[in-house]
C-alpha cells in the first residue's frame, strides 16, 4: 500500500515488525524486526509449568531481553 501511495520505505516511513517471521525477511523491503525467541520461550514455558505444578504459588513471570534483527526498513540518521 505504501508503494501505491508513493511512500518510500525507509526514506519517507520507517517500519519495524514484532516477530521476525519469514515474511519480514521476504518482504519487498526486508523489515527490521524484534526477534521472538520461539525455542527459548518454549523451554521457559515448560520449566515454569513444571515449577507451577510443584508449587501453585510459583511466580512464573519472566522478561526476555529484547533483540533486534536490523534490516533495511528503518532509516539510519547520521
Image (cartoon, rainbow, N blue to C red):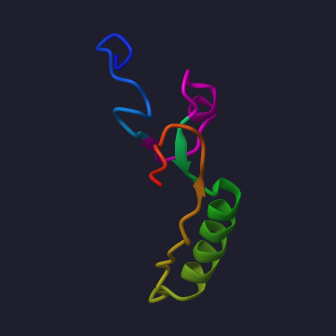
- Front position in the image: 39 or 55: 39
Q: Position of residue 64 (x, y in %)?
A: 55, 71
Frontmost residue, 69 versus 60: 69
In the image, residue 73 sits, relative to residue 41, either above or below, namely: above
Image vertical order of residue 27 relative to residue 70, above or below: above
- Residue under the point 47% across and 55% down: 78
| Res 48 quadrant in image | bottom right
Which quadrant does the N terminus fall into? top left
Q: Residue at x 55, y 72 (%)?
A: 65
Rendered residue at 69%/66% (across/down): 43
Q: Residue at x 39, y 15 (%)?
A: 3
Farthest top residue? 4
Q: Is residue 20 magenta?
A: yes
Taking the magenta stretch, the answer to whether it contains residue 52 is no
Q: Against 36, is 5 above or below?
A: above
In front of the other: 73 or 34: 73
x then y, percent, for residue 28: 56, 21
Give the residues drawn in magenta, as a range: 16-30
Depth check: 53 or 3 in front?
Answer: 3
Amino acid at each position: 500500500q505504501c508503494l501505491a501511495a508513493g511512500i518510500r520505505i525507509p526514506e519517507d516511513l520507517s517500519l519495524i515488525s514484532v516477530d521476525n517471521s519469514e515474511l519480514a525477511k521476504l518482504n519487498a523491503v526486508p523489515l527490521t524486526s524484534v526477534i521472538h525467541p520461539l525455542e527459548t520461550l518454549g523451554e521457559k514455558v515448560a520449566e515454569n509449568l513444571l515449577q507451577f505444578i510443584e508449587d501453585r504459588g510459583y511466580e512464573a513471570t519472566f522478561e526476555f531481553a529484547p533483540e533486534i534483527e536490523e534490516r533495511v526498513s528503518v532509516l539510519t540518521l547520521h
